Amino acid sequence: MSYALYHQVKHQPNLKLTVEKLMTDWNIEKIFFIGIVLLLMLINWTIEAAKWQLLLKGTEKISLGQSLLSVLTGLAISIITPNRVGEYMGRILYLRNNHKLQGITVTIIGSFAQLIVTGFLGMIGLVYYITFVVQHTWLYILLFSSILLCLFLGYFYFNLKQILEWSAKFSFLKKIITYIEIVRQFDKRQLVKILMFSFFRYAIYTIQFLLLFKLLLVEAPILNLLFTVWVIFWAMAIVPTIAIAEVGIRGETALFFLSPICTNSLGIVSSTILLWLINLIIPALIGSLYIFKMKIYEDE
């Protein structure tokens, strides 16, 4: 993937001129944009911490600060696991032993909420992309599949209690029912609130990506960029990967969907890498420091 990215960027028209502009055309406005993107990263993970705190409300009371440490620890562990499944294990390190399995259950509910938001807006992005950018058979297949998947996810999310009651009928599931009984505490109002937290995070990711595009000279009509970003986020959500190796896949995905509307391959790849570093790697490194401190504390 990384080699393919290099090959595509290398053959970009006027590459030398683009590099010179990126290296020399710096001003207060661009530095301000970088500051805004970093600030949005802090807001993003604070929102996620507030969402995690809400999810744990019926299990264990923790402060917003503890919730943020838990989220960052989960993020640190998630970067070396497929599709970030290690995030569940990382977050529950801060919970009492008798609450850890319930913690995994509510983490999954939070992930479902984020996936529903990503899928729904991804569908809207696909409709726009197919209508105004590119028409292809496989895009229609992706749209149809996305509609079915989002309907399933939405039904599952808003009918947790009924699904729990249905699962209780199977004897081989009775051992785990005890640990997922916590889903009964989530009424429709709370589930919608969790979705809103997820939407705010999604909006932040979108704004960050658009700011980085402007910063790195990725020029196209704003609506084209906006809806294509939603398609990219959805494509990334359904592609199996490991977070630490995502940069190549993210870059290829962004190039694939953005190439029809912008020829600045270097800017597209650079924006994708920066978004990955700022939103994932930097917070994960911070989270890894807290894992280190946790080990020292346990040894003492």
Image: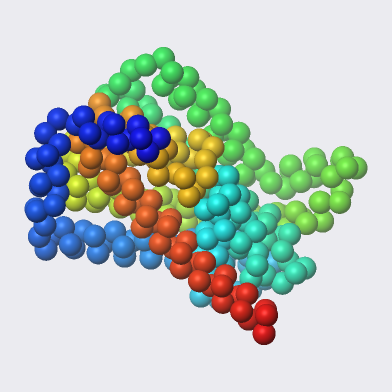
The reply, left or right, for residue 109 in relation to residue 215 is: right
| Residue 246 picture quarter | top left
Residue at 29 percent across and 41 percent down: it is 269
The reply, left or right, for residue 43 in relation to residue 193 is: left
The reply, left or right, for residue 108 in relation to residue 32 is: right
Of all residues shown, which one is farthest toward the right?
Answer: 171
Out of 185 and 6, give the one closest to the viewer.
6
* Residue 6 seen in render: yes
Q: Position of residue 252 (x, y in %)?
A: 36, 34
Residue 279, above or below 20: below
Of all residues shown, which one is farthest toward the bottom?
Answer: 300
Q: Position of residue 296 (x, y in %)?
A: 61, 79
Q: Position of residue 170 (x, y in %)?
A: 87, 40
Out of 72 and 55, give the one closest to the viewer.
72
How many marks overall? 0
Residue at 23 percent across and 45 percent down: it is 213
Residue 74, above or below 12: below
Residue at 72 percent across and 72 percent down: it is 96
Quarter in which the N terminus is drawn: top left
Out of 33 and 158, give the one closest to the viewer.
33
| Residue 12 picture quarter | top left
Residue at 47 percent across and 56 percent down: it is 197
* Residue 67 seen in render: no
